[in-house]
Image: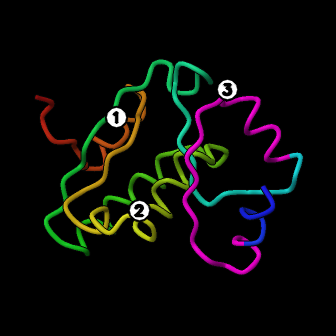
Amino acid sequence: MRTLKNEIRQKRPLSVGLIADVQATIAEVADRGVNPDLRVEPADQLGENEGQHEYFFPAPDAPALHKVDATLLATLAADDVVRRRWIERVPKYLREARSGGRWTWLSDEELESLATQGLSPAPQP
């Protein structure tokens, strides 16, 4: 934790992998004052993705990807911190996420809302 907090304070990128109970770990990290830019939480441990499915929205170039991201952010609830942070910050950390498209979890209602805005995911295999 000391190394993690030091790297964050100095604004240096750091990746940490941990096998542990997600809820207990996040609670401990928050108690110690660490707020990561990006975190992935398995649905089976937190239940946040219940009723949601993973979709890929293709984008042939950077302007199209920015439009996809903006539309997704406009559709997601303001208090949906995890998915909003994913969309906002993933290009900073994953080079391959800067083009090609965006993966995200959506409920049926969110998917329908995106369709009315002209945004549809790629067909599922």
Image position, residue 40 (x, y; %)? 53, 42
On screen, residue 19 versus residue 96, left or right, reads right
Query: Is 63 drawn above or below residue 22 in the view shown?
Result: below
Give, as a three-letter code, the residue at label 3: Asp
Against 36, residue 82 (above or below) is above
Where residue 61 appears, as percent x and y from the top left, is 17, 71
Q: Which residue is mark 2?
A: 70
| Distance between mark 1 and mark 2 Cα atoms | 15 Å
User: Which sits earlier in the primary sequence, circle 1 or circle 3?
Assistant: 3
Residue at horizontal 31 percent and vertical 62 percent from the top: 97
Q: Which mark is residue 111?
A: 1
Magenta stretch bounds: 7-30
Q: Residues within 10 Å of mark 2 (few under 14, many from 20)?
A: few
Crowd class of label 1 (few under 14; some 14 to 19; many from 20; radius 10 Å): many
- Report the amino acid beneath label 2: Ala
Mark 3 is surrounded, within 10 Å at the Cα level, by few (under 14), some (14 to 19) or many (20 or more) other residues, namely few
The disc label shown at residue 21, or none: 3
Sequence-earlier tag: 1 or 2: 2
| Contact, mark 1 vs mark 2 (Cβ under 8 Å) | no
Q: Residue at x 86, y 56 (%)?
A: 33
Compare residues 10 and 113 and report the one nearer the observer: 10
Residue 85 appears left or right of 108: right
